[in-house]
Image (spheres, rainbow, N blue to C red):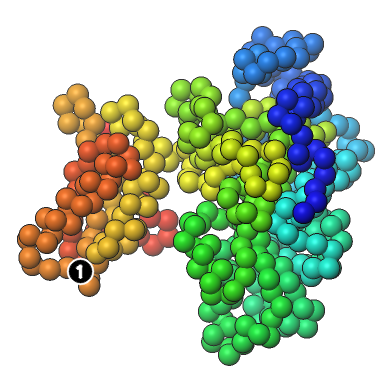
């Protein structure tokens, strides 16, 4: 397997490249009204150039609300004539976040995507069908240009219209698709319904992104469609897809450290965590002209895998995203993520899919109660077996979250059902 020299730089060389490029990012940042104010507030002068990670940590964080407050041009570092594209994400509050790109920005983004696709084993003889939405959302365009740069034949079908997707896949012998995991499952379902045989397709790989999913979902897609599935990570504030990508070893995503400085912080104390510990991913852009970002808090929770990868690339990997830091609960001083609780419940036999997490004050302490329904198939009047199930779940939860929760099992259909996004956590403290 071949890859560029920068992907295999020794740690020391990679870090000195990062500090070099950080100087450029700071220069760009001082051209924006937002950072001029923010950096001045933090006592950072225009000539400040960190020489160590301790010094680097003097730089202030940037959060999504800063991007909204700076809308529409507060974070623009280049004159209008230099800007060739923007992407925006709407979010739920109405004010979008906007990221501008110069020609150079787009070309370095395409370069990152090209190398990402190479890492996943794509080559110029592949036919790439992009089933992600094209538009302000970055999923479509993001992979499109990198795939072209790699030399693949790119079919920009966009999302939806599954029958047309099949026709394209069959007639143009598509070998790689880019889609959300749920769409790939839908495709499999549709193949069964329409009687389309696997042998009619030439598919060998899928790149999945756009929504969180478990390792079990990946394996399921791989088995059903008989393909290799690779994870990619990105968010619109950091260009979009192409921030981190799995190589053929599928053991975490290489985060391209020549383009981003990554940190993992405790979302509560904001202090950096050592490699291997789960916390919030924070990224600083190193190659962006138009919209530089310094210590941007992604809210995504992951950990750094620092051990060398079998592929030989030296850029450290991040593990699958395990949730959002906004969801974190602090219970008697311990950080707990609802996703950890959900994971334990989902792999416990005899448990249904509906549950609730209740956090309340009990005297000076916090009390955690996990209510869950028993699966209809496992429900019984035998108190002994129900008690054993309760004990089992209590133990499994304790092992996962280091807290001793109260566990209540309920008959199927007792807990409230939500239409749309479920409210699983009730915190009355
Ligand atoms: Zn690798």
Q: Residue 172 location, x and y as percent?
A: 80, 79
Which residue is identified by label 1?
Answer: 378
Q: Nearer the viewer, residue 195 or 427?
A: 195
Question: Would residue 164 appear left or right of 216 to someone viewing this image?
Answer: right
Disc 1, ligand 1: is the CB inside 8 Å?
no
Q: Residue 375 location, x and y as percent?
A: 24, 67
Residue found at x 20% / y 52% = 392
In what element is the residue under mark 1? helix
Q: Residue 62 location, x and y as percent?
A: 62, 28
Residue found at x 22% / y 35% = 367
- Would residue 148 be visible to someone looking at this image? yes
Outermost residue toward the bottom?
195
Q: Quadrant of the N terminus?
A: bottom right
The image quarter in which residue 313 lies: top right
The image quarter in which residue 97 lies: top right
Residue found at x 32% / y 26% = 333
């Amino acid at each position: 397997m071949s890859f560029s020299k920068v992907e295999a730089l020794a740690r020391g060389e990679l870090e000195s490249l990062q500090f070099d490029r950080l100087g450029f990012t700071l220069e760009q940042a001082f051209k924006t009204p937002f950072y001029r104010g923010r950096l001045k507030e933090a006592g950072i002068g225009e000539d400040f150039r960190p020489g160590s990670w301790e010094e680097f940590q003097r730089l202030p964080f940037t959060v999504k609300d800063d991007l909204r407050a700076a809308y529409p041009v507060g974070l623009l570092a280049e004159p209008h004539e230099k800007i060739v594209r923007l992407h925006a994400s709407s979010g739920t509050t109405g004010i979008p976040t906007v990221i501008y790109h110069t020609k150079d920005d787009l070309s370095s983004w395409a370069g990152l995507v090209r190398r990402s696709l190479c890492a996943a084993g794509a080559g110029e003889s592949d036919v790439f069908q992009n089933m992600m939405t094209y538009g302000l959302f970055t999923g479509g365009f993001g992979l499109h240009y990198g795939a072209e740069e790699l030399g693949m034949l790119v079919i920009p079908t966009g999302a939806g219209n599954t029958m047309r997707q099949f026709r394209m896949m069959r007639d143009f012998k598509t070998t790689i698709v880019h889609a959300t995991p749920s769409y790939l499952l839908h495709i499999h379902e549709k193949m069964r319904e329409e009687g389309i045989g696997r042998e009619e397709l030439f598919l060998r790989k899928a790149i999945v992104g756009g929504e969180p999913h478990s390792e079990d979902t990946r394996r399921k897609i791989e088995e059903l469609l008989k393909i290799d599935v690779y994870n990619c990570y990105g968010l619109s504030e950091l260009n979009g897809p192409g921030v981190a990508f799995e190589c053929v070893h599928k053991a975490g995503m290489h985060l391209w450290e020549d383009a981003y400085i990554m940190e993992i912080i405790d979302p509560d104390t904001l202090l950096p965590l050592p490699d291997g510990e789960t916390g919030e991913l924070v990224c600083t852009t190193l190659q962006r002209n138009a919209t530089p970002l310094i210590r941007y808090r992604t809210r995504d929770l992951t950990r750094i895998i620092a051990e060398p990868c079998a592929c030989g690339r030296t850029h450290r990997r991040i593990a699958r995203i395990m949730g959002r830091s906004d969801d974190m609960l602090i219970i008697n001083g311990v950080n707990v993520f609802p996703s950890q609780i959900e994971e334990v419940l989902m792999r416990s036999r005899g448990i249904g899919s509906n549950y609730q997490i209740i956090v309340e004050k009990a005297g000076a302490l916090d009390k955690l109660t996990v209510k869950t329904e028993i699966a209809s198939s496992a429900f019984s009047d035998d108190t002994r077996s129900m008690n054993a199930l309760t004990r089992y779940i209590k133990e499994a939860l304790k092992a996962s979250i280091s807290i001793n929760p109260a566990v209540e099992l309920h008959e199927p259909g007792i807990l409230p059902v939500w239409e749309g996004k479920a409210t699983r956590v009730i915190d009355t403290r």
